[in-house]
Amino acid sequence: MMWGYGNMGWAWGYGLLAIVGSVPRLDPSSSEIDQMSQHPPVYYAGGALVTDLFNLDQQPWDRMLLGLRLYGIVRTLPLIPSLIYTARRLGARRTWALAAGFLPFGIPQYFAITAGVTNDALAIGAGALVVAALVKAGTERIRPATVALVALSLGFALWSKGLLLAFGLPSVVTLQTADTGGDVYKVGSGLIDTTAIGTLTEGFDATRSLGMAPVAELEVGAATDMQFQLREGLQVIDGVEVDTTLDLAFLGLSDINDSFHGMAVIDITDPTAPVELSRVQCGGFHNDVAVWENFAIIGFDGGAGPCPQAQSNLPIVGPGAPDGSGLYVFDVTDPTAPVLTNFFNAEGEGGVDLLRDGTHNFTVHPDGLVYFATASFDADEPGFGYFDLTDMDAGQTVFSMRDISPSATDGCHDIGLSVGNTYHGALEGPDEVARDLAVCPAIEETYIWDITDPRNISEVAVIPNPAINIHHGGRFTPDGRTVVLGDELAGAGAPSGCFAGGPVGAMFTYDISLPEVPVLTGYVSASESPGTIETCTSHFYNFVPNAAGKVLSMTGWYGSGMVMHDLTPLADESFDVVSAAPMGAGPEVAHLEPEGAELWNAYAYRGYVYANSYTGNTGFFVASLDGYTGTADADLAPYSVDEGIVWGKWTPRG
């Protein structure tokens, strides 16, 4: 249903885009994107061969999808005869062996994989061949041909998916325990063959997969979001005014025992040796965080109170006192000694408390305006508001989000901004005009807003993608031409997701060159689903600065770690989204899974990757990134997750 709906949307979009000019096809001379990151190349090579053979790249997207699905079905075909053969070799009668061949048709995931565009289809077929070879080896006298069959089938499986290296152990056990007729050579040659092929293939794959490496970690407790700020010049540290350079990370803390909720300030001037400078613990939960000039803000869904570690200019009780949910503003002129200065959670007009459930996420406009939304979902009146960090005495403005988007049933989960970019005018011709935009993923659908006048917001478009379970993590690419939407599957409460490259828990990309007509161009997902134990779904991300001008995203995928994708083909204005839009997993550029972590986010910042884990005690991870760490790219201004501009603005003293 999704793809049919999408085609209808593309038809409308294509017709309207024709008004402002045609969209040329992808330049054949453009550089290739390496699809092979976590996976060996056999599936992708076969898919490319099928695509070239049947000219699928010249077909509409749905036909291309159908062709690649049929390719996936063919890849799984060895499973059926392998099951029948295995059952017969193990002594089953013909009738029961044939029945065994039908077992996969009772497994829903089998249909999901064969109907998807994923290398797991080939892994199923290759794995079935390995099992059949092992059964043959284990039920007859070992001969050189049997040894070669086991080794070759395992090698083919490893070129299909590195995880199938697990078959190496039963291969060894089978060859050791099988009837060899006392021929030690046969056992030895089998072990050497199997080990050599496994080492070569898995070693080759590892060299392609190691895009990131752990550099440092810090025990801060469980952490949520974070933002960064570079301070160069005259500043205050430990109460002393000094002229120096300081790189800071501001972390939201959300300990599962409710004892550490609040904010931590980390010195990352040396990324390999991060140091905690200060923390404030206010109770509460969720704890989004932002920094602008000398102010740090944390938001609470509820449960917060006074922050005993921080100096405070607010009363502990009564009017103006922090009362459990809302936005806490700290003066962090001295990052070692935050001072709580303001609290925002007033009632809306007419006494309607539009922020009764606090603020889930918020965003700081480059001018210092803080946009925030209610944490209520399915609300009678989803709240939205703002206050000005340059004039906090003026208080806040709070109103119903339906004043902007009448169809809204939920508040913005988060808000992303595009400031200072140009777009096609709304059906006015090919000329571009300067427009500032915001994206509001609101659980069931996403809204694009015009914020050219940041206090007078109007709706531009609605994106109702039914393939997204929870609209979440809306961000613009640096040029503003593409908006990316995440899907936080079941609120990160489902113990699976990603489905090895399918659209579950994925990140969807939309061309918004004409903001009134967002056009779906594809999606990406983490290639390795952690299965049914850990959570795998997209969460918070940013874009990696690079001199090549590529659109590289860095994302936290909970149990699937931190992943960098190359979104350049999906964000290329010359790409023909009607006839050749790519889809599915990849191309992944780098992937790292810190052991035991559930990554809330992953951000590229000044040559390194930083990530927070929502579980465990470590909480804060730093990684190097091949081709980025220690290069000129690291000197480029990093794009933030919220503002869409450089991270936390700061002006030196004096």
Image: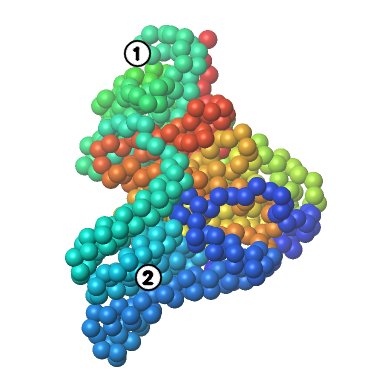
Residue kind at label 2, given as amino acid type: Leu
Left or right: 197, with 435 as reference point: left
**Residue drawn at (30%, 58%), measured in percent from left and top?**
189
The local secondary structure at tag 2 comes to helix
Estimate the x, y position of residue 160 in percent, counting from the top left.
44, 60
Residue kind at label 1, given as amino acid type: Asp
Q: Is residue 413 above or below residue 625?
A: below
- Count of marks, rendered view: 2
**Residue drawn at (35%, 25%), measured in percent from left and top?**
274
* Res 612 seen here: yes
Estimate the x, y position of residue 513 in percent, counting from the top left.
69, 50
Q: Nearer the viewer, residue 184 or 541?
A: 184
Left or right: 75, with 566 as reference point: left
* Residue 238: assigned label: 1
Between discs 1 and 2, the one toward the N terminus: 2
Query: What is the quadrant of residue 143 in the picture?
Result: bottom left
Q: Which residue is mark 2?
A: 129
* Res 382 seen here: no
Q: Nearer the viewer, residue 504 or 26?
A: 26
Estimate the x, y position of residue 617 in percent, counting from the top left.
25, 38
* Residue 572: assigned label: none
The local secondary structure at tag 1 comes to loop
**Residue drawn at (36%, 53%), measured in percent from left and top?**
196
Cα distance in 3D space between marks 1 and 2: 65 Å
Q: Nearer the viewer, residue 268 or 628?
A: 628
Q: Is residue 191 above or below residue 256?
A: below
Circle 2: is it few (<14), some (14-19), or many (20+) Cα within 10 Å? Answer: many
Q: Nearer the viewer, residue 260 or 85?
A: 85
Q: Residue furthest bottom?
A: 95
